[in-house]
Structures are given as structure tokens and as C-alpha cells.
Image (spheres, grey):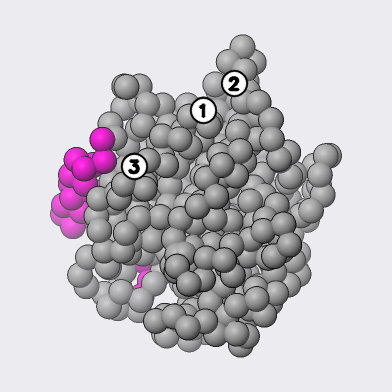
């Protein structure tokens, strides 16, 4: 488990900021209120060739496996806000048996951070205090993507509050920034001798908010996957420095359990650019996962810590774990769960877990993904 990293937008969710240093890595000690080990982070160059296959590290890196856990949408609305105030370090207890053993845990933080600001004209707006960042890190979350359709729910004033909180706490947030370079800057770390890079971006943005939420050279905002060339360039740059490249996206169509055309188009491009693990959320439903040649793709991680009423398809959740040894990805496991009446994720057990796993396996049928690496 890594507890501190660097920090880093959508038609619908959003954000993250990394240290602005370049060149030599910067060592960050855990700030007060954020527990965990020291993490070495560094900004990736804006461009660069993919690692050559003749490089001794090109396929397996240091040769040591890293267990990665990824999960879906988290916010702190309604009763979750009360729980954050009363028992912030127990909210993910229902999934701790999977998250705690993992070397790296990544989630989607689907909320603005701060209080007040310019509330956007949307059906749903989410905002949480900076304590939410501390609570997630204290529970074993290592990387949070704010590149989603709620990251700027309180406009540019809310963005400034979010970025201030991220900087003050040195929180491991990606996908959001004071400009486009900051928003796309990956979280980077070395675990078990393996160099890992995580990039976040959103394909989901309300049409009327795309221009005001997308990070540019002169405007803070979210890393937008609609800027496909930029996203692919960042993946290629990360490939030149990392043993394992992870792309975490906000993508898909709400309430749909099969990937949409945009997802099916983007995933192969990311893999070709050098992404090894491609995951994401937004649909508020669990979608299928599997291998795309040698990359691993999970099209929809579902809700995670999110109001879902404790029943129905929206309450279906889970955690994907996978072992990365450089570019080799082994032992993918979907750990199914349900969101309970308190809007918290709890892993399923017994017959319930078996039936949920079978439903998840069936969802691969509309993805063209495979159960083993290779293929065409």
C-alpha cells in the first residue's frame, strides 16, 4: 500500500495535481494527517518514444509483481457526509480485506473538494470537505482520479479550493490541475522495484460545460479524453519511463452494462500507445473486463462508495485486483460486492459472491475481450 503520491474532467465527472518539478524525482514525506510510507514521484516528459523491446526492462521490469486494486465511484453526499464526520477511517471496512493487501489502490473521486463556490447548473452537484482526501488515504487509497463530470461542480472557485486542498495535503489526486500539463501529469511511484505511472482523464463532460471545465494552457480544469491526441501522447511518454502504465478513465454510458462505441474505439488506441491496464467508471453499473491482446481492460467498475439505495443494479459493486510484473498482467480477479443501506461497499460472500462473479463473467460477452492474454 502506497499512501502518498502526486495529484491529478467530464461530460459528467473530474481532477488531480502533481508536483510541478521536472527532471530528478522528488521524495514526498507523508504530510500531517496522511499516513503511510514515503513515495518517490516524478513528472513524465511531455513526449518520448516507447520503450524498446530490446530493453531488458521492457516486458517484466524488475521482475517483481505488484498487486493493483481498482474500484469505481466515490463521493460523500447525504449520509456519507455524516459518516465522514463521525467515523472517517471505517467507511471502507467492508472492502478492506482486498484493499489493504494491495500494493496500489486507485479509485474515482467523484466530487469537488471545498465549500461553496460557483455551483454549476446541473441536475446533481457534489462537494466534500478536504477531510475526504485524508479519510481515503488513511483507509489505503493510493491514487484518486478527479477527472470526471463532478470535479468542477462548483466552477473555477471550487477548482481553486480543490487544488489548494490537494497541495496542502499533498494528496495523491490526478486528472485535475491548474493547467493542462498539471491535469494530465501522471502519478508515478516505484513499488517492488517496478516503475508505475497512472494517468487519468474523462470522456464525460456536459456539453455546455466542456469549454469551461477542460484544462488548457491558460485555464485550470480537467484532463479531457476528448483531447485524444494529448491523452495518447501522455501514454507514450509514460511508456518511455515506466514498467507498468495505467490509464484510469471516466467513460461509458449511464446505466448501460456494455461498452459504448467511444470506449470500444479508445481502448485499442490506448493499448497501442503503451497502456497496460485500462480501467474506468461512470455508467453507475458494473461492466465486463478482460484482455485486449496483452493489455487488460475493465470497461466499468460501477459505483463504490455512492448513494445507491442498497438495492438494484446501481448497488452492484466490486474491486478488480490484478498482478503487474512490468507489462505482464496476471491473475485478474473481480471481487464482487454490494452497496449497503449506508451507501458503503461490502464484499459479497458465499453463494451471493458466486452468483455475482458469474454475472460479471457473462458481461464480457459484449466486450470482445478475452480471458487470457494474446489473441488478435
How would you rate the neighbour count of disc 3 (Cα within 10 Å): few for under 14, some for 14-19, many for 20 or more?
A: some
Disc 2: which residue:
58
Quick check: is 346 in the magenta stretch? yes
Quick check: is 348 in the magenta stretch? yes
Residue at the spot 44% in from the left edge and 80% down from the top edge = 122
Q: Earlier in the sequence, mark 3 or mark 1?
A: 3
Which stretch appears magenta? 343-368
Magenta part mainly helix, strand or loop?
helix
| Cα–Cα span, label 3 and label 1 | 21 Å
Residue at the spot 54% in from the left edge and 62% down from the top edge = 9
Q: Is residue 253 left or right of residue 233?
A: left
| Cα–Cα span, label 2 and label 1 | 7 Å
The secondary structure type at the circle numbered 2 is loop
Q: Quadrant of residue 254?
A: bottom left
- Position of 232 relative to 177 (above/below): above
- Position of 281 relative to 365 (above/below): below
Q: Earlier in the sequence, mark 2 or mark 1?
A: 2
Residue at the spot 53% in from the left edge and 77% down from the top edge = 153
The secondary structure type at the circle numbered 3 is helix
How would you rate the neighbour count of disc 1 (Cα within 10 Å): few for under 14, some for 14-19, many for 20 or more?
A: many
- Give the numbered dot on residue 327: 1
Q: Quadrant of residue 134?
A: bottom right
| Cα–Cα span, label 3 and label 2 | 26 Å
**Residue 185: % across, % down:** 67, 49
Whether the residues at callouts 3 and 2 have beta carbons within 8 Å, the answer is: no
Residue at the spot 41% in from the left edge and 34% down from the top edge = 268
Disc 3: which residue:
264
Quick one: which residue is furthest to the top in this view?
54
**Residue 147: % across, % down:** 54, 60
Callout in the foreground (3, 2): 3
Please tell me which residue lies in front, 257 or 222. Answer: 222
Amino acid at each position: 500500500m502506497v499512501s502518498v503520491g502526486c495529484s491529478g474532467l467530464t461530460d459528467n465527472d473530474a481532477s488531480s495535481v502533481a508536483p510541478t518539478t521536472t527532471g530528478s524525482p522528488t521524495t514526498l514525506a507523508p504530510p500531517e494527517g496522511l499516513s503511510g510510507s514515503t513515495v518517490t514521484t516524478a513528472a513524465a516528459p511531455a513526449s518520448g518514444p516507447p520503450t524498446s523491446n530490446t530493453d531488458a526492462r521492457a516486458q517484466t521490469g524488475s521482475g517483481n509483481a505488484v498487486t493493483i486494486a481498482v474500484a469505481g465511484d466515490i463521493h460523500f453526499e447525504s449520509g456519507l457526509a455524516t459518516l465522514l464526520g463521525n467515523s472517517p477511517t471505517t467507511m471502507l471496512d467492508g472492502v478492506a480485506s482486498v484493499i489493504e493487501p494491495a500494493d496500489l489502490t486507485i479509485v474515482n473521486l467523484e466530487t469537488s473538494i471545498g465549500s461553496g463556490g460557483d455551483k454549476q447548473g446541473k441536475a446533481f452537484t457534489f462537494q466534500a470537505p478536504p477531510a475526504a482526501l485524508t479519510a481515503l488515504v488513511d483507509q489505503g487509497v493510493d491514487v484518486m482520479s478527479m477527472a470526471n463530470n463532478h470535479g468542477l461542480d462548483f466552477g473555477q472557485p471550487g477548482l481553486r479550493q480543490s487544488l489548494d486542498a490537494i497541495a496542502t495535503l499533498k494528496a495523491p489526486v490526478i486528472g485535475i490541475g491548474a493547467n493542462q500539463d498539471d491535469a494530465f501529469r501522471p502519478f508515478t511511484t516505484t513499488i517492488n522495484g517496478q516503475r508505475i505511472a497512472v494517468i487519468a482523464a474523462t470522456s464525460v463532460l456536459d456539453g455546455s460545460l466542456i469549454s469551461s471545465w477542460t484544462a488548457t494552457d491558460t485555464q485550470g480544469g480537467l484532463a479531457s479524453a476528448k483531447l485524444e491526441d494529448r491523452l495518447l501522447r501522455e501514454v507514450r511518454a509514460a511508456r518511455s519511463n515506466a514498467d507498468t502504465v495505467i490509464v484510469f478513465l471516466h467513460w461509458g454510458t449511464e446505466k448501460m452494462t456494455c461498452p459504448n462505441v467511444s470506449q470500444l474505439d479508445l481502448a485499442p488506441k490506448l493499448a497501442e500507445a503503451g497502456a497496460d491496464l485500462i480501467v474506468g467508471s461512470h455508467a453507475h453499473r458494473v461492466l465486463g473486463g478482460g484482455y485486449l491482446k496483452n493489455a487488460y481492460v475493465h470497461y466499468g467498475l460501477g459505483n463504490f462508495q455512492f448513494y445507491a439505495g442498497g438495492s438494484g443494479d446501481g448497488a452492484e459493486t466490486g474491486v478488480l485486483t490484478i498482478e503487474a510484473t512490468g507489462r505482464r498482467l496476471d491473475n485478474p480477479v473481480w471481487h464482487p460486492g454490494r452497496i449497503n443501506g449506508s451507501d458503503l461497499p461490502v464484499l459479497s460472500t458465499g453463494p451471493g459472491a458466486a452468483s455475482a462473479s458469474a454475472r460479471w463473467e457473462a458481461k464480457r460477452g459484449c466486450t470482445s475481450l478475452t480471458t487470457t492474454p494474446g489473441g488478435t
